[in-house]
């Protein structure tokens, strides 16, 4: 049975991020899929490699079919589809999201990002194009101006349930005054808030990898919505070490003077 024989066509929609797409529904289990029609400038090898991607937080490519119309060749690519996005979920929340859930959603996105990066691809990380279904996150490859900053902005939206455009300028820079003000109003841990700043403001372009490495030891707790005790060795600054050395030196002098007085 071909792909189309197992699916029913539902409707054509104009998706905010994906553009015009056809929505299909699996006859047996009701799973949704969307079809994107492209000119056939993508190779069979690329399609084959993409169809072999398997990750719980990355949208699956279900099928691809080549067809001709008016002497032009096109490819219909079918991906799994969810009719709810992370933005939809945030809009429908009346109360602040629990910190354990924020870590859970953030880590799922992080896992998907790491997988896509391993394929030398990027992902357009914004809440309008991150799929959400009953706690499950799915992302897909796409153009991104700055994945690290985008990931920080998604975390900002998870914490505030406010649009990233409140702190994002037209030239994609961050309005740090607005960010500082809004983060001061948040009642989450310093660690969570610090990760927003690390992602949106750090000049270190490896922050995604760094944060993934930091959180991975706590993966089970995070995905089970359990608290975790984050600890990291902090390198003492030269100033702190110098101050400590001075305090030790003064203490030694004090003891020497005391011993000298006893000798007299």
Image: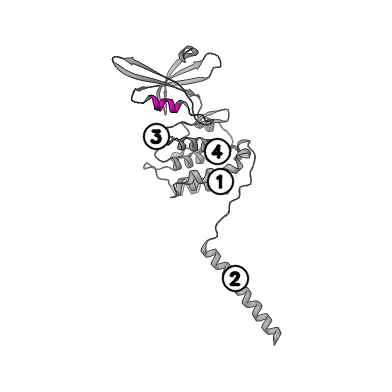
Q: Residue at x 63, y 39 (%)?
A: 221
Give me the disc on residue 12.
none
Disc 1: CA contacts within 10 A as few (<14), some (14-19) or many (>=20): some
* Residue 23 in which image quadrant: top left
Q: Position of residue 93 (x, y in %)?
A: 56, 32
Q: Nearer the viewer, mark 1 or mark 2?
A: 1
Give me the disc on residue 214.
1
* Residue 242 in which image quadrant: bottom right
Upstream in sequence: badge 3 or badge 4: 4
Q: What number of labels is visible?
A: 4
Front residue of 209/148: it is 209
Q: Which residue is mark 3?
A: 143
Upstream in sequence: badge 4 or badge 2: 4
Q: Is 219 part of what is drawn in magenta?
A: no
Report the magenta residues as a range.
44-50
Front residue of 17/210: it is 210
| Helix, strand or loop for disc 2 | helix
Give the CA separation, mark 3 to mark 4: 21 Å
| Helix, strand or loop for disc 3 | loop
| Helix, strand or loop for disc 1 | helix
């Amino acid at each position: 049975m071909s792909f189309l024989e197992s699916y029913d066509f539902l409707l054509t929609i104009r998706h905010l991020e994906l553009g015009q797409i056809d929505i299909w529904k699996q006859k047996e289990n009701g799973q949704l899929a969307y079809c994107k029609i492209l000119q056939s400038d993508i190779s069979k090898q690329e399609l084959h490699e993409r169809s072999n991607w398997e990750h719980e937080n990355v949208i699956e490519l279900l099928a691809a079919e080549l067809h001709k119309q008016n002497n032009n060749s096109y490819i219909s690519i079918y991906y799994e589809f969810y009719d709810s996005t992370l933005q939809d979920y945030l809009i429908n929340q009346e109360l602040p999201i629990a910190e354990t859930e924020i870590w859970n959603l953030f880590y799922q996105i992080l896992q998907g990002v790491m997988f896509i990066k391993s394929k030398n691809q990027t992902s357009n990380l914004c809440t309008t194009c991150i799929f959400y279904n009953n706690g499950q996150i799915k992302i897909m490859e796409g153009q991104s101006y700055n994945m690290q900053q985008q990931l920080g902005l998604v975390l900002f939206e998870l914490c505030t349930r406010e649009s990233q455009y409140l702190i994002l300028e037209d030239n994609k820079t961050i309005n740090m005054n607005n960010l500082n003000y809004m983060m001061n109003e948040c009642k989450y841990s310093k660690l969570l808030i610090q990760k927003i700043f690390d992602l949106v403001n750090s000049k270190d372009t490896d922050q995604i990898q760094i944060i993934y490495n930091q959180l991975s030891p706590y993966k089970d707790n995070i995905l089970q919505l359990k608290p975790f005790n984050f600890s990291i060795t902090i390198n003492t600054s030269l100033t702190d070490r110098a101050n400590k050395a001075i305090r030790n030196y003064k203490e030694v002098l004090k003891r020497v003077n005391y011993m000298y007085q006893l000798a007299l």
